[in-house]
Image (cartoon, helix red, strand yellow):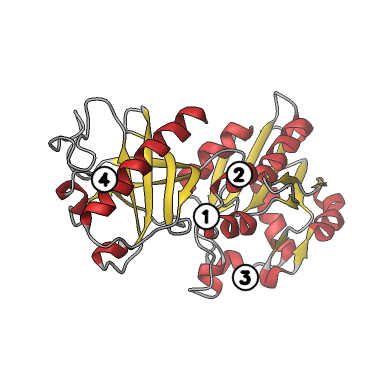
Amino acid sequence: MTSARTAITIGNFDGVHIGHVALVRRARELVGASGRVVALAFDPHPASRLKPGSEPERLSSFAQREVWLRAAGADSVERLEPTPGLLGLSPEAFVRAKVEKYAPSWFVEGADFHFGKGRAGNVRTLAELGPRFGFACDVVAPVEAALTDCLLIRASSTLVRWLLSQGRVRDAAIVLGRPYELAGTVVQGDRRGREIGVPTANLATDQMLPADGVYAGVGVLPDGREVPAAVNVGSRPTFNGHSRRLEAYLLIEGGWRGACGGGPWAPIPGLPEYGWPLRVRMQSWIREDLRFEGVKPLCEQMARDIERCRQAVTMA
């Protein structure tokens, strides 16, 4: 490893929004095309160790962050497990450990970066330690996002979570630089969708669900195919459900058929009923989650929702 060509950036990188991308791109500018950019991502969130239950809802898995950080320009993405030993290091000891392992010429961070026991270290600490350990600290300015309501606001994972909690998936996509994507495994539900002619994929995921409602989205199948999807997030109020879940009706040729009694159910060719990986990208809000007085009005509304979702994804 050539120390003059290495830059590291450290953080949670949850969701990998446009501010995180700016860090990686700045690191790449500093080291050049032949240099090395290393992103160190905490996983799980340190708060889950310091005060279990206080950690924010998760926007992304480590695997997703690795893909997106590499796409931004990182050569390697390494997992930082927030063990008691790591979290108990003084800022100087934390820096020394990273210098000994990576020999960086730069630490590239945002102005609000904190590290070390009790979050005692910050970018000023890095600047002070730099001459002793042979690196420079490059501080990247906050990146602002222009939302659909014309509000200009600093990009952050906290902002993304708030936007999702309001169902504002288009604005979340602006801050993320791409649609919000949930990844998980298709599991068995209560099969009500199949019974009424709208079979859905129930997604088991540990990521944050957006606000209850119906959304237009895109489903990414295991073979990489992208298909339009009508996505419902909620607790199925018409059937007195309680737990929140995400269900996606995949609009796929030769696959699931029968929107509201329009034909018999059929599985997606080449896939089992359950146990296969699915990614769902949230494109736009369609309507709030409602309780209907019976299956017939629900089916009529779902048919309208499916057509709106098809059109919305086609135009996106």
Q: Position of residue 271 (x, y in %)?
A: 20, 34
Mark 2, residue position: 176
- Furthest toward the left, the residue is 264
Q: Which mark is residue 208?
A: none
**Residue at the disc numbered 4:** 200
* Residue at mark 2 to residue at mark 4: CA–CA distance: 27 Å
Mark before the other along the chain sequence, 1 or 3: 3
Q: Secondary structure at mark 2?
A: helix
Q: Judge the density around disc 2: few (<14), some (14-19), many (≥20) Cα neighbours within 10 Å.
A: many
Say what secondary structure mark 3 lies in: loop
- Point out the frontmost of discs 1 and 3: 1
Residue 99 visible in the snapshot: yes
**Three-letter amino acid code of the residue under disc 2:** Leu
Q: Amino acid at mark 4?
A: Thr
Q: Nearer the viewer, residue 304 or 54?
A: 304
Query: Under tag 1, what secondary structure?
Result: loop
- Residue at horizontal 66%, vertical 55%? 97
Q: Is residue 300 left or right of residue 174?
A: left
Return the residue at label 3.
Answer: 88
Which of the marked residues, 2 or 1, is nearer the chain's N terminus? 1
Task: Give me the C-alpha separation between circle 1 and circle 3.
Answer: 38 Å
Question: Where, by quadrant of the figure, is residue 77 drawn?
Answer: top right
Residue that label 1 marks: 167
Kindly identify the residue that appears in the image at 56 percent across and 73 percent down: 50
Counting residues from the N terminus, which is met first, the one under dot 2 or under dot 4?
2
Is label 4 in contact with label 3 (beta carbons under 8 Å)? no
Residue type, numbered disc 3: Gly
Q: Earlier in the sequence, mark 2 or mark 3?
A: 3
* Residue type of the residue flagged with mark 1: Gly
Q: Nearer the viewer, mark 2 or mark 1?
A: 1
